[in-house]
Image (cartoon, rainbow, N blue to C red):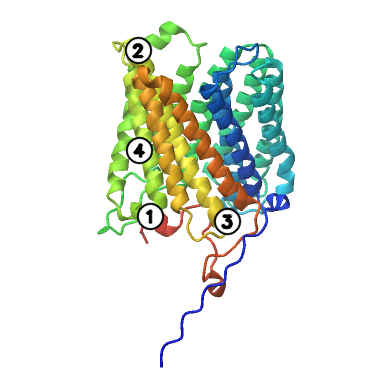
Amino acid sequence: MPAPAPRAEETFPPPRWNARLLLTQPHRLCFAAAGLVWAASACFWGLVLLLPPPAAAGVPATTLHALAFTLGPMPLFFAGFLFTSAPKWLRRPELATAALAPGVGAVVTGWLLALAIGPWSSVAAGLGLVLCALGWAVLWLQLVSLRRGATRPSRHFDAIATVCGLVVLALAAAALALLRERPDAARELARTAFWAAVLPVFLLASHRLLPFLSHADAPQPDRDDPQRDAWWVPALPLAASVLQALASWSGLDPELAARAWPIHVLLPGAAGLLTLWLALRWASHPATRSPLLHLLLRAFAWSGAAWIALAISALPLLPPSLHAAFEAAALHAMALGFAGGTMLAMVSRLSAAQAGQSQAVDRLARRLEGLLQLLLAARLLAAFVPATAAWALPLAALLWAGLALAWLRRHGGLAGRPRTRPAGAARRKASAPAPDRLSASDRGLGGK
């Protein structure tokens, strides 16, 4: 008797997008808002490079691009991740998502105002950043309030919350600079804020979540000893980041900065060598076969390359053209390669896992990460070969806009749809991975 034919799986149309679902979980609201600001700022920069606008009396497009890239979507992604994960770190109840809506709404409104009217009015751009500063101040106070009533202390949370306070100061200072029609000072503040606030948050969160920045060496398959938490592993990059923030501020004495070149070579150089050594050690570990860890390891390696480029740029005998090339390469390798790659992988994973997706790193996620690598290559080519900048810069901007729009369509869609379960999970009642840390299989630390 022939075996019965397998029954075809039932298929259902995806549920409709519902804005009210954004208020059910912090990451839904904050990630959707971050994706919107990311897409708006990326499309703005792409249009500027592809269709240069006529000269206007407002804020230069390069200044708005620097401010939006540094202080636009990334802090909102921080908020979504922290308000979702920090209550688990601290063992306390979550805040109601609706309480975050006023702060998030002010940040989004401020950035849309600054990007839409800023090229024609410095005052409008400044008022937009005032809204951003007020909105982020509200979110920061709510973040700090999580510490009250916590049943378990977390040094990582305390350090991240402190650094996030610098985002408020940076937005307020940039707003004041634009209201006083000082776009040069605002652009300088954007670069300083990246090294002083944005990058340290990535380093501290990575030390909390990733094995690359929490252990002195990669465990080998034949070792079963518990892993050592090496605090000095993230300490070197953090010290180099603070040093670079100071170097980015032009208010320092130029003669003092010139005499301090050895530390500007040695500290980033040491951070770069340590990072690349760890990346090579972890590359041979079986844990990095996990798609998520593979993407995060690649982003981690970019930070090592960025530190080495910064060290080279500080050499006193380097020609000015090469100094500018290595400095620009270091900034974009760190901002796009490390921060962008880590952000893309981690927020996509949290969004997909909370939505009940069976695979956080699917075909689309790999394609988006490939786009990121391609646009980074185009941006580095423009830095080292200025003759290619006429086409390489618009190409990088176009890829950045495509990446932002594709991410917003996928994960903004997930934010407004009810959670689904992977195939077979309903019968097993399996839950999604915890969003506040990588799963044991992802971390691959073994240990007892």
| CA distance for labels 1 and 3 | 19 Å
Residue type at mark 3: give it. Answer: Gln
User: Which residue lies at the image location 39% right of the left edge and 50% below the top edge?
Assistant: 293
Q: Residues within 10 Å of mark 4 (few under 14, many from 20)?
A: many
- Which structural element holds mark 2? helix
**Of the two numbered discs 2 and 1 in the rendering, the one whose residue sits closer to the viewer:** 2
Q: Which residue is mark 1?
A: 290
| CA distance for labels 2 and 4 | 26 Å
Residue 67 image offset from top left, x and y in percent: 57, 24
Q: Residues within 10 Å of mark 2 (few under 14, many from 20)?
A: few
Q: Which residue is mark 3?
A: 354
Q: Which residue is mark 2?
A: 321
Tag 4 or tag 1, which sits nearer the N-term?
Answer: 1
- Which structural element holds mark 3? helix
Q: Residues within 10 Å of mark 3 (few under 14, many from 20)?
A: many
**Of the two numbered discs 2 and 4 in the rendering, the one whose residue sits closer to the viewer:** 2
Residue 123 image offset from top left, x and y in percent: 71, 16
Q: Which residue is mark 4?
A: 301
- Which structural element holds mark 1? loop
From the viewer's perspective, tell me whether residue 413 is left or right of residue 434: right
Residue 326 image offset from top left, x and y in percent: 35, 21
User: Which residue lies at the image location 56% right of the left edge and 36% below the top edge?
Assistant: 74
- Which structural element holds mark 4? helix
| CA distance for labels 3 and 2 | 47 Å
Spot the residue most to the left: 222
Residue type at mark 4: give it. Answer: Ala
